[in-house]
Image (spheres, rainbow, N blue to C red):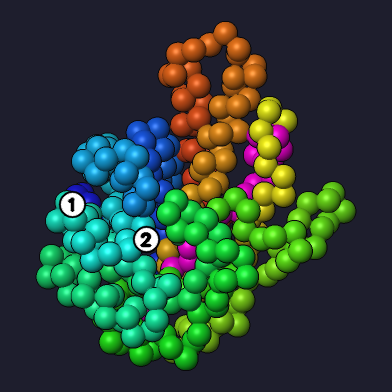
Amino acid sequence: MPLVTTKEMFAKAYNGGYAVGAFNVNNMEIVQGITEAAGELNSPVILQVSKGARAYANHTYLVKLVEAAVIENPQIPIALHLDHGDTFELCKSCIDGGFTSVMIDASSKPFEENIALTRKVVEYAHDHGVVVEAELGTLAGVEDEVAVEHGHESYTRPEEVEEFVTRTGCDSLAIAIGTSHGAYKFKASQCTRNADGILVPPPLRFDVLHECIKRLPGFPIVLHGSSSVPQEFVKIVNQYGGNMPDAIGIPEEQLREAAKLAVCKINIDSDIRLAMTATIRKYFAEHPDHFDPRQYLKPARQAVKDIVAHKIVYVLGSDGKA
Ligand SMILES: [Zn+2]
């Protein structure tokens, strides 16, 4: 099947009590690793491109890589989504350039400005058969060009969601319930430590999620910043010359709970970065004489595939739902 929007994906996910993974793509190995896992597990998948990815790899290269993945995996629905579009022009460029879904993130702007810009993108997108994700509330952390200092994040205010969705006409809504961008989702002072000295983050605000669901029955909710930062990868990175002290993510069981509710899209990027980096660092340490990029990118691609397969089965629950 050709690239699809997320409309039907989300309707099925909402009713089926699972979420669709939205994984960031930046190069061929990442596209292949993600879609091979989704293809083998018969799972729908969203490939998302950030402004930074577009700057790194070029719009056309990324679209063509995704189109190749669609041809290689004809049995599963794949959507191509713009992650964190920050202007109408960027969204328009992606809508005109083959994307099936865009995010307009005006969450840092005042409520009325967020509504106005989101509405403008929705009108253009819907005229072109493309769906729109919007955001209310701000996440802490750093992801590409989105950076919010810890302490400056704000939870979504449930009393605003109904008016926002009605007035903008957006198709899905990203909310802030305590997830965070990057591999350092919380400061040590926000956490406790377990017996192994590993940071334990504060729990997600399920009360905020439930309030939003109550006000938006049947409407797809999105969670950004939902990597779990597996400590086995952090350990490998640090063991082989890296320096990532106190890297920390969102516990997978909390995301699984959210996926069973109205959360239909869960964004995962840092875990893919970590899996690749840990694999390549270890590979270089064990094979100091190797210099063919295929030698170390092959296990890196396999690591992407393995982590995505793990997410599909144990976090998203989207296996067999294509
Ligand atoms: Zn995000």
Amino acid type at image mark 2: His
Q: Is mark 2 within 8 Å of ligand 1?
A: yes
Question: Of the residues under marks 2 and 1, which one precedes in the sequence?
Answer: 2
Residue drawn 36% across and 52% down?
Answer: 50
Q: Which mark is residue 296?
A: none
**Going 55% across and 77% down the picture, which residue do you hit?**
155
- Tell me if 128 is positioned left or right of 185 in this view: left
Q: Which residue is mark 1?
A: 98
- To which residue does mark 2 refer? 84
Q: Are marks 2 and 1 in contact (CB under 8 Å)?
A: no
Quarter of the rendered image showing ligand 1: bottom left
Q: Quadrant of residue 61?
A: top left
Q: Secondary structure at mark 1?
A: loop
**Residue under the image location 56 percent in, 71 percent down:** 153
Quadrant showing the C terminus: bottom left
Q: Identify the residue at horizontal 24%, vertical 78% (top origin).
A: 119
Instruction: Please report the bounds of the magenta region as a residue range.
Output: 219-238
- Does the rendering let one see residue 145? yes
